[in-house]
Image: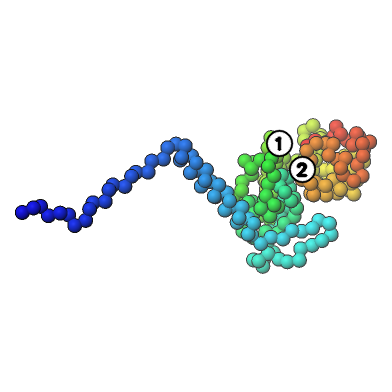
Amino acid sequence: MPASQPSEQEAPPRPRLRLGIGAAVTLGLVVLSAAVGWGILRGQSTPVDAISLKGGSSTSAPADGNGGLYVHVLGEVEHPGLYILEADARLVDALAAAGGTREDADLQAVNLARALTDGEQIIVPAKGAASGGAAGATAPSAIGADGKVDLNAATQDDLETLPRIGPALAQRILDWREENGRFRAVDDLLAVPGIGDKLLAGMRDKVRV
């Protein structure tokens, strides 16, 4: 008798997927980009209020109803300012609320996953800059061992130690930093209303950026 034929034809073996080193690296970058993108989207979707520093005020509270966190974001971000975030917000949320980071922001100097605390100041440094304001960490003194005042970390009291800088002018310097981000050069002080060449010359050797 003729041998019986199989009722079904055997399926051909499936080809094995082989990833070279280059393909594996590319896949890893795609996964990392997706993770970073999710973090940014999470931050953008977090209910947030911005507080005007020129006499305005917030008109609505965060969705959690408990007052949220007040955080002050400075440095290499698109929109430095004071923001209200959800109580469980992380540093990535604060940066997203401030419009994201600028191209020269040093993200290796900050921990995007760190939980925030109420009332803290976050300073995102530029690449290559001294870490004078690591985000959320205890900030070092704005007055260095050389006696110079760091314009990007100085408080109003620090600024008032400078020659001919009183409370009003110190506040203008802080306002300029708030609106424009970090000082990139000592000469940027000339953009502050009330500071001219003569005043700057008198304190040039007492400040740094």
Disc 2 residue crowd, few under 14, some 14–19, many 20+, Cα 10 Å: many
Helix or strand or loop: what does disc 2 sit on?
A: loop
Residue 103 at x, y percent in the picture: 68, 42
Task: Give the residue drawn at x 90%, y 34%.
Answer: 201
Q: Where is residue 127 in the image (x, y as percent from the top left)?
A: 68, 37
What secondary structure is found at the residue carrying circle 1? loop
**Gap between marks 2 and 1 measured at Cα:** 11 Å
- Determine which residue is flagged by label 1: 129
Decide if residue 33 is on the left or right side of residue 126. Answer: left
**Is residue 2 found left or right of 158 in the rendered image?**
left
Please report the residue visible at 44 percent of the width from the left and 36 percent of the height from the top: 21
Which amino acid lies under the numbered mark 1 shown in the image of this protein? Ala
**Mark 2: which amino acid?**
Arg
Q: Could you say which is closer to the camera, residue 21 or residue 140?
A: 21
Does residue 169 appear left or right of residue 47 in this picture? right
Q: Looking at the picture, does residue 121 appear above or below residue 209?
A: below
Image quadrant in which you'd find residue 104: top right
In this rendered view, identify the residue nearer to me: 196 or 22: 22
Mark 2 lies on residue: 182
Quarter holding the N terminus is: bottom left
Q: Where is residue 133 in the image (x, y as percent from the top left)?
A: 71, 43
The answer, for residue 147, to whether it is visible in the render is yes
Query: 14 or 28, which is in the foreground?
Result: 14
Q: Are marks 2 and 1 in contact (CB under 8 Å)?
A: yes
Q: Residue furthest right?
A: 198
Q: Can residue 120 be seen in this view?
A: no
> Which of 90/104 is in front?
104
Question: Can you give x and y, in whole percent of width and height, for residue 187 in the image?
Answer: 85, 36
Residue at (84%, 57%) from the top-left corner? 54
Q: Residues within 10 Å of mark 1 (few under 14, many from 20)?
A: few
